[in-house]
Amino acid sequence: MSFGPRVFFMGKMIKITKHENKITIEGHAGFAPPGQDIVCAGVSALLCTLALSSDELTCDETSCELSPGSSWFRYESLSEELDLLVRSFFIGVRNIADAYPECVAVSVYESNGTGSERVGTKERKEI
């Protein structure tokens, strides 16, 4: 099955960032027109699964907002269960980023005691 040549909407990209107690997702993939974009749908499905799984499988305090072009997931602390779910989310989004590098960028920031420090972009790092 052929889908024809890939046409990307220039200047578009989903930026997924892991901060100390929050994951942010900004932008649009630009892989296809809105409502038909499988890259955006994949990232959104993974975030929804993370939020729903954290509610059902952990006792952690979390909050989430899913909006077109700007979404986030917050947590106070990472229990063993929530840590596994967050790492699983990043396995999924990195897999999408590997398949569609022109549409998705993944960054990880860790606290260095005085703020945040960038420790990786789209690399398979331990989170």
Image (tube, rainbow, N blue to C red):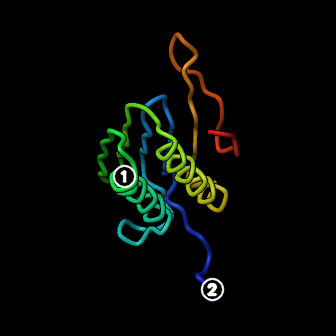
Quadrant for residue 26, please give it: top left
Q: Residues within 10 Å of mark 1 (few under 14, many from 20)?
A: many
Quadrant in which the C terminus is drawn: top right
37 shown above or below 106: below
Are circles 2 and 1 on residues that touch, CB within 8 Å? no
SS of the residue under disc 2? loop
**Residue located beneath label 1 in the image:** 51
Give the residue type at disc 2.
Ser
Instruction: Tell me which amino acid carries mark 1.
Output: Ala
x, y percent for residue 114: 52, 10
* Residue 125 x, y percent position in the rendering: 69, 40
Residue at image point 57% right, 46% down: 105
Q: Residue at x 35, y 69 (%)?
A: 35
Q: Which residue is pictured at 42% across the width and 48% down the height?
A: 27
Seen from the viewer's position, the closer of residues 70 and 123 is 123
Quadrant where the N terminus sits is bottom right
Q: Secondary structure at mark 1?
A: helix
Q: Residue furthest top?
A: 114
In the image, residue 22 sits, relative to residue 93, either above or below, namely above
- Nearest to N terminus: mark 2 or mark 1: 2
Marks 2 and 1 sit apart, C-alpha to C-alpha, by 34 Å
Which labelled disc corresponds to residue 88? none
